[in-house]
Amino acid sequence: MADPRFGVLGPLEVTLGERPVDLGGLRPRMLLALLLSTGGQEVAFHRIVEVLWGAEPPATALGTVHSHLARLRRALEPDRPPRSPSRVLVRVGAGYAVRPAPGCFDADRFSGRATEGQELVAAGRHGPGRELLDAALAEWRGGAYADFPDAPFALAAARRLEEQRVQARIDRMAAELGLGRHEAAVAELSGLAREHPGRERLWQLLAVALYRSGRQVDALAVLREARATLSGRFGVDPGPPLHALEAAILRHEPVTLDGPAPAPAAVEFPVPAAPIVGRSAELAALGDLLRAARVVTVTGPPGVGKSRLVQEYAHRHAELTGVPPVLWPGEPGPETRLLVVDGSGPVPAERLAASTRVLAAAREPLGLPGEALLELGPLPLGDAVDLFVARAAEAPDRGLAAAVCTAVGCLPAAVERAAALTRALPVAALAVHLREDPAGLLGPAADPIGGALLPGDAALLGRLAVFEGGFDLDAMDAVAPGQRARLPGLVARSLVQVVRDRETGVAHRYRLGRPLRQYAAGLIDDDERARAVRRHRDWARRLSGEAAAGLRTAAADDWLRRLHRERRNVRAALRHALADGDGAAAVDVAGGVAWYWFHHGATAEGTAWLRASLAAAGQDRSSAGRAARSRAQLGLSALRSIAGDVPDAVAQAHAAVWEAERAGHDYLRADALCALSFVAAASGDAAFAGAAAARSYRAADVVGWPDLRAQAGMVSGHAQYLRGDLTAAADLLAEARRSARKCGYGWVVTVAGWLGVEVALDQARHDEARQAALLLSGRLGDSPTVSSWLVTTLSLARALTLTGDGEAGALLWGAVTGIGRTVGLTAQRIGRAHAHRTRHGAPAHRHTAAYVRGLEMDRAEAVALIATLAP
């Protein structure tokens, strides 16, 4: 299977073998160019949307991006077996990356050959060096990323490549002079010097070429022009090399060629022990910041790689400019372009030349005027694994390597120390030990504090360590009341990381990295830790109760997203409650978030937590205890229903009704009766479902809550549908939707609408059902609910088949089946009997291939397909 070859040194091109690859229109081409511009690093999904559409993307942007990604994958790897992972366009974290095979990306070939050629010329091997530089420059077919002249990402990437191209041309001219071809070099050097007048090295080479060609007067004229240009246009005086060259020419002395550029590693600056892994995006960001600001400080927690990043940038900067950096407290001279500060210190910025930039690595900002900050976080997991593999004693299994990297929080220093330990420990054993006691194995590499802490700061960090999924300010107040004033100091020291909103950039959450959280847990004693755990559990208990109510309102989607952000904290609260024997708290938390698990299709996880919590809660006969058990059983019934376990779903609903009645809780009783009617219908007992629906409707009417009335109307319509009274069912479902809209109960609006589609299909109103299903599925495309989207999309698939669009129907039927398997949800078993659907709207045999393709689709790809079907 041929690897795709990518070209960006000119218009974007991709070839497979000798055949050009059709990438589609402008946006898929721009998407591929964006991914290539990062050098294999992850591009977050929100960044992709922003690049393709700007600040106001269309509502269909999510699905369209996934559609472009799917098309690009098929184009780049047409022979990839079904369901096998992509090797080229890969999913990384919350985004995507393109990883070309070695030698298959012209920008990489150019950079590698140019670097090697420069090294050969510097070593005096001018012939081989020139050949490599010629090969490097031959890769260019025009301007880099020439298709996208106005795209900011392309401008930045093209600027970096063009800088390397200019340096390669300079190095090639140095090789020409080294080979004695002085007269031939004069014309090209003249053009280059005027094209890039700020580069002293070009003026130097031109003057040397002229002088060695017997043109002393012209050489001195060039040096005078250089002095006037540098002073007049750039406000700087020529450096010592030009002064020394002019003096030598005036004295008629021989002049020497000192190579293409001084070696970037001077005596006072450390040489990297090994190549850097990852951080391409951060290195590019440093370049952008230093062009805009005079002082840039890289901040972050200990071990995150601040010094290594700064060191790498300084060496690359020296290679491009020909001027070595100075490491503070070394004394910078007038020619110094970059002063590197490793650690905080009193840097006298006022004494620096105007052209000197300061690049610092520090836990806290230097506090200098005009300082810009780059906050450095842990490596992405894929890069951390690459680093571990590169440093390990022998090539480990990447899955085990990922476990090791996760255990140490993907901090580069800890990853490298862990890799060194593979000489003594098997990787599998190392992963286990690091999960339990990273500091015991890694020593200083696992110390996330890096200095003394005030007692109050240490106590706050110890309390915050109970949050496993980050926290907002309200959650912090619940666990560590009255401590907000200490938070800015911990953020400034990079001990607490800020999570910013992707759209607004405003700080809305905070988190402790995994190593710090493990370390901080030991900063408080057992009694204080137990109090923090109880406060965290109480906060989760209140959150789950508020969420249970909020999910029945117009803010349901916001609550689903909030619970998704807090899912790790919910698990931690449940785990601690069960470990401490607090069954009452466990059943409150699990019962409150059960509908989050339901909407996300997390049937296995939700079932496990609910069963464990109910078992721990025992048989509390108080009204509150019975009500809590009823809520949990109600949630368990819903989860077992969408998992296809109808008998258990019915049993749990009966138990929920029984507990609610004995608790004297009318609202819960009406809610449980609704659930009992719905799951009884799935069992095929239409008569019992109708009776339960009637009871639920009467109970809802008595208590008078509008959300229950709407829900009871919906299950009553469902019961009529099962009994075959389609007209009555349609009327009841339409009324339920109207009532649900008035009170903002979105789930009932959706389910009643879905059932209405099912009724219309059975009444042979196929076109009407198709349009209604398209509207429903379209509205749910970006919604966090999975279960509702799956069942409505299944109905849409039936409607498409019954209206003659069998291939699209088969694709969506396959997508619903495949996505349902990943979350443990069988959409075909929800509502009307599976056999009925199979007879009315299932894919025909001639569309089997489309069904199989659908099995490989993810939700975003299915949403994109649905968007193309809308009128």
Image (spheres, grey):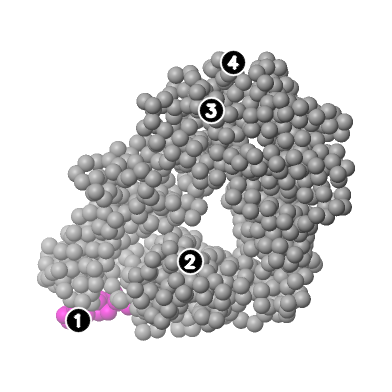
Q: Disc 4 versus disc 1: distance between alpha carbons?
A: 104 Å
Residue count near mark 1 (Cα–Cα under 10 Å), binned few <14, some 14–19, many ≥20: few
Q: Nearer the viewer, residue 413 or 633?
A: 633
Q: Are marks 4 and 1 in contact (CB under 8 Å)?
A: no
> Residue flagged by tag 4: what amino acid is it?
Gln
Q: Nearer the viewer, residue 712 or 277?
A: 712
Q: Nearer the viewer, residue 142 or 101?
A: 101
Q: Is residue 841 above or below residue 223?
A: above
Q: Is residue 842 above or below residue 728?
A: below
Disc on res. 251:
1
- Magenta residues: mostly which secondary structure? helix
- Judge from the rendering whether residue 658 lies leftward or rightward of residue 236; answer left or right: right
The residue under the point 80% across, 67% down is 482
Residue holding disc 2: 403
Q: Are marks 3 and 1 in contact (CB under 8 Å)?
A: no
The residue under the point 56% across, 77% down is 437
Q: Which residues are magenta?
A: 240-256
Q: Disc 3 versus disc 1: distance between alpha carbons?
A: 101 Å
Residue holding disc 3: 835
Where does the image place residue 710, in percent across and percent down from the top left?
Answer: 76, 29
Q: Secondary structure at mark 4?
A: loop
- Judge from the rendering whether residue 807 lies leftward or rightward of residue 630; answer left or right: left
Dot in front, 2 or 1: 2
